[in-house]
Image: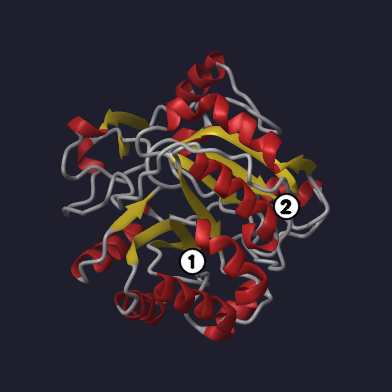
Amino acid sequence: MLSSFRPWLLHIMPRAAVHGSYAAGLPAVGNALRRCPSRTIIPALHARPLAWGATLNRSYVVPSHEDALPNQHLNMEARYAVELPHYEPGDNSHIEEVFGNVHSTESFSAVDGPGVRFLVFVQGCAMRCLFCSNPDTWNLKGGTRTSSKELADQIRKVRNYLRPRGGVTISGGEAMLQPRFVSAVFQEVHAMGLNTTIDTTGQGTKHGNWDVVLPHTDLVLFCIKHMDPLKYESLTGLKQKGALRFADELAERKIPFYLRYVYIPGYTDAPKDIDRLIEWSKKQPTFQGIELLPYHVLGKNKWEVMHIPYPLDGVQTPSHETVSKVIKLFNDNEIPVICAN
């Protein structure tokens, strides 16, 4: 759902393609690094306390000059700290084969849940977010028709690389709009001894979608979009009440979740909106932390290719200083922060 809101480093790293993904070779990595002289990569184990932008691949991205570092200590998680259930591999012959529409897959992701993960992007989304980075996933009937058994075979080939903490994350589009397919894939994943994560905005209904998917879901990456109901609808085209009901469902089922929040200047950055986000988050019994996603325009080219006017044309990426202040505000309220900037 939010593949474009990732650390810049991961956009130049080689991808191991399984189906429908793109690949970049090592020469491309070298060229990209040479084009980024103002950045320095420091291994997380040796990162200094003032390092900017803890990314989820165990590295920190910092300005190359020490005097450019923020003049404050920021507490950021370098990974998803939640511990998910461990499963013993089992028989999968009883699991139903279901077909779904898949946009693409990535065999190794470090930014979509704990550990190393196999990432699946499915088709279909009812929202029309002004900042959507994947408008090519809106059409439910797009992508490649894929069998849950076929997808499970692809995951099985790399499962040893996903252990011990990793597993499979299904994103989109909106993964909840293909509930039977997602449910079948998640059951296959559990039969392999791996855990499951869904990246979702909570679309659908309790009986038609959530009751089908959530019994097989270990972790949720929940993108709330906005805490103000009117601004939520303006940003997405949908009412906010469905998302809040979904959050209640997570609480009732005791499913842990991280809250993904896209920080957009002029749209989601008002102090009162951040205060409401903090207040609401602290009331959620299974809330694990905020994943703060500073806005950028890496998905804008897809709108252009599809000949759709980009609604946020001219909106700038928030500065490091601005994002630092928001992170500190979360810190002051004892809310764990993951910031992939």
User: What amino acid is at disc 2?
Assistant: Gln
Vertical order, 75 against 162 (above or below): below
The residue shown at (63%, 82%) is 239
> In this figure, what is the number of numbered marks?
2
Q: Secondary structure at mark 2?
A: loop
Mark number for residue 159? none
The residue shown at (19%, 69%) is 332
Question: In this orientation, which residue lies closer to the viewer: 203 or 270?
Answer: 203
Q: Position of residue 206 (x, y in %)?
A: 60, 76
Q: Position of residue 201 (x, y in %)?
A: 56, 66
Vertical order, 236 against 57 (above or below): below
Q: Which residue in the rendered view is the most extreme toward the top?
A: 27
Question: In this orientation, which residue lies closer to the viewer: 87 or 218?
Answer: 87
Residue identified by numbered label 1: 265
> Counting residues from the N terminus, which is met first, the one under dot 1 or under dot 2?
2
Tell me the quadrant of the picture where the N terminus can be found: bottom right
Q: Position of residue 47 (x, y in %)?
A: 20, 35
103 to the left or right of 240: right
Among the 4 quarters of the image, the one containing residue 193: top left
Residue identified by numbered label 2: 123
218 to the left or right of 313: left
128 to the left or right of 256: right
Vertical order, 29 against 252 (above or below): above
Q: Secondary structure at mark 1?
A: loop
User: What amino acid is at disc 1?
Assistant: Pro
Among the 4 quarters of the image, the one containing residue 276: bottom left
289 to the left or right of 298: left
| Front label number (1 vs 2) | 2
Residue 264 shows in this picture: no
Mark 2, Cα crowd under 10 Å, few <14 / some 14-19 / many 20+, is many
